[in-house]
Amino acid sequence: MQKSGHRTRDQTKSGTRHYAFRPALVLVAIGLVVAGLLFNFIPKNDESSIPHAGALQVAGSETMRAVVSACAEDFMNRNPQADIIVRGGGSGDGLAALLHGIVDISMTSRELSRREREFATSKKFEFSEFPLALDGIAVVVHRSNPVAALDLAQLHDIFAGKIRNWRDLRGADSEIVAFARAAGSGTASLFGARVLGEDAYGDSIRHLPANDAIVREVAAHPGAIGYADLGAARAGGDRIKVVALRRDAQSEPAATTPDDILSGRYPLARSLTLTTAGHPSGIAKAFIDFCLSANGQALLQRAGYVGIKPAAQ
């Protein structure tokens, strides 16, 4: 772990002394007094304006990797002596690296498991979690697909391999080609918990390592369906279509809009979180504070996520 240094300004108070028959010295003394008085009215730098130095290792959620990298680039531009490396690999890998002291911050797009918390307790530290934004797992289909909404039971049957043709969902008579995230992904973990429950993925499901890979495959196959984070879905543009979701057949469909995500109407919403072992300090704290600042929140919202704090205009 790296410690950041803080530059401090030494302040010296000057007083006035009278010098007989030396007007130049009197003028100098008066000037120093005036300068001292003016200095007291100059706004002092707050902690956010102090340059931060040091190295920082961040790893974890593929969903968060691109936007946290953008935050890191902005932070380093403002703090030239800071060096932040951001790697993906999935929420599970990031937490494992954090637990073993390999990285300073883990990016997590799912809740921490009981096993992870118990391991942290055995190491005699507690996790500190800092939610940055809200995300929705978007269910995406090819842009030509006429299906506009699905309920969670239908989604379950697609990914469990029970529904294999779009005609069973009032779509075209074509085979369903389903893409899912690989194991270890926070996106896959949440989708499995809320959609599949105790059931396993069907044998025909194709697993891919990243959200943008799923978006590319769905855009290329008319019969495809997959799921991805909001940032990847937004980047897919009009090459794909995001399907609205219903909790059950009687519910109103909810979309991946900020209102539906913030209200909880969208059933596949989650928090994107930075996690540390114990309370962060130094450059780790400074970087987390930046991500939570208006500038950091603006970057998150531009990437397509739902901010939890006001963004810079």
Image (tube, rainbow, N blue to C red):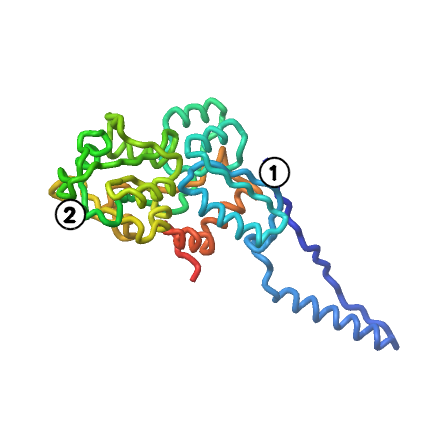
Measure the C-alpha gap from mark 2 to mark 1. 50 Å
Instruction: Give the residue drawn at x 72%, y 69%.
Output: 33
Q: Which mark is residue 2?
A: 1
Q: Quadrant of the C terminus?
A: bottom left
- Single out the mark in the foreground, 2 or 1: 2
Amino acid residing under circle 2 = Glu
On screen, residue 18 versus residue 193, left or right, reads right
Local secondary structure at mark 2: loop
- Most extreme residue toward the top, as rendered? 122
Is label 1 in a helix, a strand or a loop?
loop
Residue in the picture at 56% in, 40% down: 56
Q: Amino acid at mark 1?
A: Gln
Seen in the picture, residue 28 relative to 131 is either above or below; the reply is below
- 146 relative to 25, above or below: above
Q: Earlier in the sequence, mark 2 or mark 1?
A: 1
Point out residue 138 in the picture as x, y percentages from the top left corner: 29, 44
Q: Which mark is residue 252?
A: 2
Which image quadrant: the N terminus? Answer: top right
Q: Picture coordinates of residue 212 (x, y %)?
A: 38, 43
Q: Who is closer to the viewer here, 51 or 64?
A: 64
User: Dot 1, crowdedness within 10 Å: few (<14), some or many (≥20)?
Assistant: some
Q: Which mark is residue 44?
A: none
Q: Residue at x 52, y 46 (%)?
A: 287
Q: Quadrant of residue 156?
A: top left
Q: Position of residue 63 (x, y in %)?
A: 40, 41
Q: Nearer the viewer, residue 232 or 224?
A: 224
